[in-house]
Amino acid sequence: MAVSWGDLVAIVGGLGAGFLSGTIGIGGGLLFVPTMPVGLRLSQAAAQGTSLVAIIPTAIVGGVTHFRRGNVLPRPALLMGGGGVVGAVIGALVAVEVPGPVLARVWGGFLVFSAYRLTVQAIRQPQRTP
Amino acid sequence: MLVPLQVFWTDTPQRNANANSLVAIIPIAVAALPIYFFRKGSPQIDFHVALFLVIGSVVGAYVGARLLSRIPDRPLKVAVAVVLGLVGLKEVLWP
């Protein structure tokens, strides 16, 4: 199999997204989906499907590493995982009915609001050593 | 999504919230994959790209996860806020 420049871009992009995934705890899809159509010239649909596949091994490696280092609280993680599975089923069914741009804006709004709240928390938080 | 919710509602320290989120994503992605595959008329997965992405992302995830323990809570929170803010703005402005 010949390795092209596009493949190298994918490896480097994967490295960056995986790094953020490991530190920040995002699945990778958050970064893969918006960047792949630009960086790798995939269609939006292909970006979603491909990122979903790439997320699984990334999250397993990151998750196991976190677990071994004692960063995971097992109970909430299990509950969220279980709840998330139910949410994923409902979400997938809803997503088919709602126009894409509306969905993207609602999601983007949630992210911006979260970023704002986290920043406020970080500012108010007393500085302490970990 | 799981990261901010934990931090706001349950006061989970940022480090644990990030780690929990990544673990919780595993079953979610595993469940979502068949749904995506069967609901879409024509599932589009570029396995060639996925392979090369995974080569990079698995290494990145391992390094990132090891590094997480060393980053203090506040800078970590700011980093999460920056990434969520940028992606959020992109989605709002150019959905």
Image (cartoon, coloured by chain):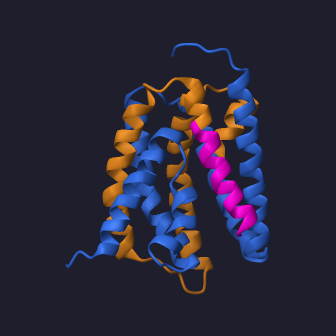
Location of residue A115 by image quarter: top right
Q: Give the chain letter for orange.
A: B
Instruction: Reply above or below: B58 against B46.
Output: above
Camera-side residue of A115 and A54:
A115
Question: Which residue is painted at 50% across and 80% down in the image?
Answer: B44
In magenta, the rendered stretch is B79-95
What x and y, as percent, mark residue A21? Answer: 48, 47
Question: Which residue is painted at 35% across and 51% down in the image?
Answer: B58
What x and y, as percent, mark residue B4? Answer: 68, 39
Furthest residue in direction left, as rendered: A1
Instruction: Reply above or below: A46 against B52.
Output: below
Q: Give the chain letter for blue.
A: A
Camera-side residue of A125 and A56:
A125
Indicate whether residue A78 is drawn in magenta.
no
Q: Is residue A82 left or right of residue A40?
A: right
Question: Which residue is painted at 75% across and 31% down in the image?
Answer: A120
Question: Which residue is painted at 59% across and 47% down in the image?
Answer: B83
Location of residue A64 by image quarter: top left
What x and y, as percent, mark residue A1? Answer: 19, 79
Total numbered badges shown on the rendered structure: 0
Task: Please identify the quadrant where the C terminus of chain B is shown.
Answer: bottom right
| Dominant SS in magenta | helix
Instruction: Reply above or below: B69 against A16.
Output: above
Camera-side residue of B57 and B44:
B57
Indicate whether residue B91 is drawn in magenta.
yes
What x and y, as percent, mark residue B49? Answer: 37, 72
One can see residue A31 in this view: yes
One can see residue A76 in this view: no
Camera-side residue of A106 and B83:
B83
